[in-house]
Amino acid sequence: MTPVLVINSGSSSFKYQLLDMDTERTLASGLVERIGEPIGVARHTVHATPVDAGEGSPTFLDATRTRELPIPDHTAGFAVMLDAFASHGPSLADTPPVAVGHRVVHGGARFFEPTLITPLVEINIDELSVLAPLHNPANLAGIVAARTAFPEVPHVAVFDTAFHQTLSPAAYTYAIDTEIAASHRIRRYGFHGTSHKFVSEAAAAFLGRPLGELKQIVFHLGNGASVTAIDGGRSIDTSMGFTPLEGLVMGTRSGDIDPAVLFQLERRAGMSVDDLDDLLNKRSGLLGLAGSNDLRDIRAAMERGEPRALLAFEVYVHRLRAYAGAYLAQLGGADVISFTAGVGENAPRVRAEALGTLGFAGVEIDHERNESAERGIRVISTDASAVTVLVVPTDEELEIARQTLSVARP
């Protein structure tokens, strides 16, 4: 067994998964949240516990335990996590992780591959917090706590931005004063890179085709959403930019917007920089248009005939189509288009509408396949479609574990 522990740390919570990389099976996972509040919550799930189903055929049952207790900081949260492993398994004393992988949102232009964490790397992650003030400090807090909990094993940072370091200058450069841009490191970085890498490689493996031969478009559609054009396994364009705010309409983020709108709101509505930041990141997107950031609520409202919900859906789809067309042009056509994440994997109408005008490019969606409740990676295009359209469940934790092991293999 080759266990790898994956940590995804936020400011007041962290998620974890323990994977056996010999089989790439998740052994346990959990969430520690409400860190710093009077009462925190810790959930620990042991996966695929064998249960006797009778007739000599064992089945498997996940077992989840929940605790509520004070969790003052991330270090205390890791102690709670370790106690959960000790009490409910699997035992880290018997099978300690060979490495710990950490999701880090922003690697700037410095980090373009999984990186062994050293004190110098920690300093760099902290310094890059100016580019991701909501994420990198939280990621670093998890790293510090995890290195205290597991001091004897290698820790590896896997950066959301790393996959997009293959963008050309033409794709990552904003058309502003070059000296100002260089002084403040303003350029397109792109995000969701771990997911886009995993999905594009999974699609190639599923189709039995070499990754290097494929032109792919991957839609990662969740509460946060992005789309990437991938040529031969390399990101050549992506919708998120200097921050995750740019690009598609998202759950609470506006996506693309004329910058002059901000000037107008400052001058005419008296909104401050913080007000504008809050508006575009937390009160826009589907929430701003329809009053909910959950597409399931919006679909229900559409069925009730609510115009606000219908408009929100149409705006959402309009942006998807715009990027699909743009990336077909950037790639010179596509072999594969994949949908992933919560909306991408579970919203057939979104998939159908997003690609509904691409018949000219040889895209044909099979209605029955698209509407199927089947899980797992699957084809939703017709057999005659010139472009293969897939639903590919993402697994960012597995991708982080793979990358971690690639540089920390014992």
Image (cartoon, rainbow, N blue to C red):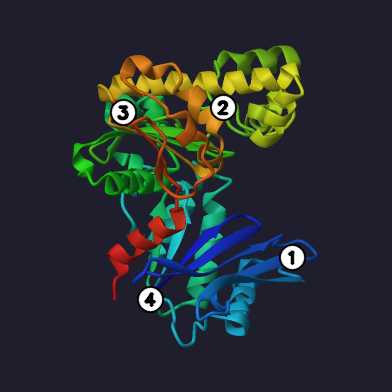
Going by the numbered disc 2, the residue's amino acid type is: Val
Going by the numbered disc 4, the residue's amino acid type is: Val
C-alpha span from label 4 to label 3: 41 Å
Of labels 2 and 4, earlier in sequence is: 4
Q: Nearer the viewer, residue 207 or 122?
A: 207
| Mark sitting on residue 84 | none
Q: Do the CB atoms of the residues marked 1 and 4 lie less than 8 Å apart?
A: no
- The residue to which callout 2 is attached is 249
- The residue to which callout 1 is attached is 40
Position of residue 345 in the picture relative to residue 305 (left or right): left
C-alpha span from label 2 to label 1: 32 Å
Going by the numbered disc 1, the residue's amino acid type is: Gly
Residue 220 in percent (x, y) is at 47, 38
| Callout 3: SS | loop
Q: Nearer the viewer, residue 12 or 360?
A: 360
Of labels 1 and 3, earlier in sequence is: 1
Residue at (47, 77) in percent of width and height: 150
- The residue to which callout 3 is attached is 387
Of labels 4 and 3, earlier in sequence is: 4
- The residue to which callout 4 is attached is 98
Of labels 2 and 1, earlier in sequence is: 1
